[in-house]
Amino acid sequence: MTQPFLGFWETLKKPIIGMAPMDGVTDFACRSITAKHGRPSVMMTEFTTATGLFYAPEEILRDFEYSEIERPIVAQIYGNIPEDFYRATHVVCELGFDGVDINMGCPSKAVTQKLCGGRLITAPDLALEIIRATRRGIDDWASGQTLTDIKTPAKVIRVIEKMNAGRTFTRKKIPYSVKTRIGYEDVVIEKWVETLLTEKPAVITVHGRTLKQMYRGLASWEAIAAAVKVAQGSGTLILGNGDIHSLEEAHQKIEMSGVDGVLIGRGSIGNPWIFSGKMPTQEDRFKIALEHASYYDNGQENCPGNSPEIRKRDFKSIRKHLIGYLSHFSEAAALRHRALQALTFEELKQVLDLTKFGGHTE
Ligand SMILES: Cc1cc2nc3c(=O)[nH]c(=O)nc-3n(C[C@H](O)[C@H](O)[C@H](O)COP(=O)(O)O)c2cc1C
């Protein structure tokens, strides 16, 4: 029996402790900060439409902006048209990502009503066709097929060239993976994992909730453990996901479920230290919150990435991260309230006054 191609996943130290993709959260700034101050095993982009990127590349490909510090970095795509996955995978490869992940878990109505995301759990034949198209895309690109060969619109190629400025890459095969949930309405994880395994993904990440649950209730780590049993001997790695709030808890869940690792989502927002286990001081919190915010202060020179005009984000993007950074110390609530009003980097710097720690404000 042929084994799945694991690519970079094989080189990761076990257990794998990565950051889960979160739309509107895990953008280039968040990932750069997390890589620098937390060092997770792996990170993923926000989910990105496999179809839309060919129509609005400037806007959509912004989600694929990354810098070298983030490696290994996996691009996550979603959609319902296999041919679009085939073409989008060429873009992912061309941008030098270490892997591609297919979203089969998103519960949002806007996504599921089009048979995308987690809705694919109810359409296994289409889901498998999508995986096969993705694999073909990887293989054909690795064999030398270009974006022009597959008739990629010139405007898409122009954006990619800008994003790739200064980067060198070699054509090589990258691994494909799937992130999913334990079922649509009912828990069907065993049958579903068995189905996915027929196309030999490198990794299946299982969020221990059904789609119907959205984010309610608790993630079922028993269902995740059942997925591990089904995958035993297949060579595919299983990552568990859901409700991890500390590194210690991650290790407990890994132990009880037998997974190869975990992805941490909400617990890592404004908390890159969750991956290192370090207890941040209040000064660490202020400093890193400001460093993170500076990445949204358009035009800052310290900003990672290649193409500032593509990377550009609204300064308000820092708000959801501030809620995480500014917690777990006395007076946090009052400070948070003030920090969330800041409309510019300079305003935020006045609220998060580093001089009170006797250091420099930089
Ligand atoms: C704001 C937000 C955005 C999310 N966006 C994505 C996404 O783009 N792709 C994806 O696979 N999952 C997405 N998720 C789901 C998370 O990756 C993860 O599966 C879920 O939050 C459970 O893990 P946690 O309890 O550690 O947060 C998102 C979750 C949140 C809260």
Image (tube, rainbow, N blue to C red):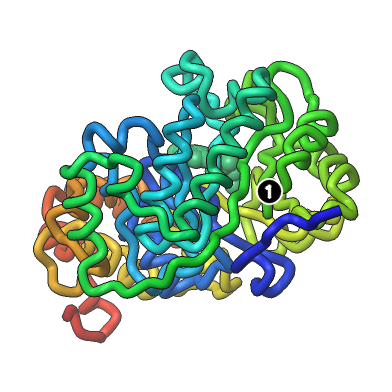
- Horizontal side, residue 271 vs residue 248: left or right: left
Q: Position of residue 10 (x, y in %)?
A: 68, 69
Callout 1: helix, strand or loop?
loop
Q: How would you rate the neighbour count of disc 1 (Cα within 10 Å): few for under 14, some for 14-19, many for 20 or more?
A: many
Q: Quadrant of residue 259?
A: bottom right
| Res 137 visible | yes
Identify the residue at image location x=32%, y=74%: 168
Q: Position of residue 264 (x, y in %)?
A: 59, 53
Q: Quadrant of residue 60?
A: top left
User: Looking at the image, is 180 positioned above or below residue 343?
Assistant: above
Q: Quadrant of residue 361?
A: bottom left
Q: Position of residue 304 (x, y in %)?
A: 26, 69
Q: Position of residue 276 (x, y in %)?
A: 57, 73
Identify the residue at image location x=30%, y=54%: 335
User: Looking at the image, is 115 positioned above or below residue 10?
Assistant: above
**Which amino acid lies under the numbered mark 1 shown in the image of this protein?**
Pro
Q: Nearer the viewer, residue 16 or 247?
A: 16
Q: Nearer the viewer, residue 186 or 355?
A: 186
Identify the residue at image location x=22%, y=35%: 56
Q: Which residue is mark 1?
A: 201
Quadrant location of the C terminus? bottom left
